[in-house]
Amino acid sequence: MQSSLKSNLNEGICYITIGKSNLIFSVTDLNGNQLMWLRPTNLKFRGSKQRFSAFAMEQTVFRLVKNLRVINLIKLHFVFSGFFRKWIGRAIGWAFRKQHITFLSYKYRIARPHGLMRPKKKRRL
């Protein structure tokens, strides 16, 4: 029983939630049980300019991967959600690749803010 549990822990899901003023990394196993979470504010990065800097993201990912290696989790599925900015995704992906984490899949859940115009009507050709 122990060996099958350990082999399943090689894969996990990393949920990256990007807000207007913060960034949250949450790691779960394939069943959805949360293993750990981390934010740049936990590493004493204050202010939105500091939290969204490439250095802050790299240090946060470095700390997260350090904790993931303890539980032997090296293959991750990534789910981005929130107000996604393309350069943030690239910086996070670069930081994970630098730490030799295997990417299994990407998924984007882009939030549409309330109060904006509705999408254009689909027209027949």
Image (cartoon, helix red, strand yellow):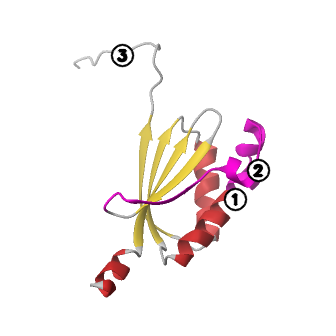
How far apart are the two marked residues, 3 and 1, measured between alpha carbons?
Answer: 39 Å
Give the alpha-carbon distance from disc 2 to disc 1, as whole Å: 14 Å
Magenta residues span 31-59
Give percent across and percent down for residue 36.
51, 60
Which of label 2 and label 3 is nearer to you? Answer: 2
3 or 1: mark nearer the eye: 1
Q: Which mark is residue 120?
A: 3
Kind of residue at badge 3: Lys
Q: Could you tell me which residue is drawn at 50 percent across and 54 percent down?
A: 26
Give the mark count.
3
Q: Indicate whether 119 appears above or below 28.
A: above
Residue 80 falls inside the magenta stretch: no
| Residue that mark 1 sits on | 58
- Do labels 2 and 1 touch, CB within 8 Å? no
Kindly report which numbered mark, 2 or 1, lies closer to the viewer in this rendering: 2
Q: Secondary structure at mark 1?
A: helix
Residue assigned mark 2: 44
Which residue sits at x=40%, y=70%? 11
Residue type highlighted by circle 2: Lys
Q: Quadrant of residue 65?
A: bottom right
As for residue 51 lying within the magenta part, the answer is yes
Q: Label 2: few (<14), some or many (≥20) within 10 Å? A: few
Q: Quadrant of residue 13?
A: bottom left
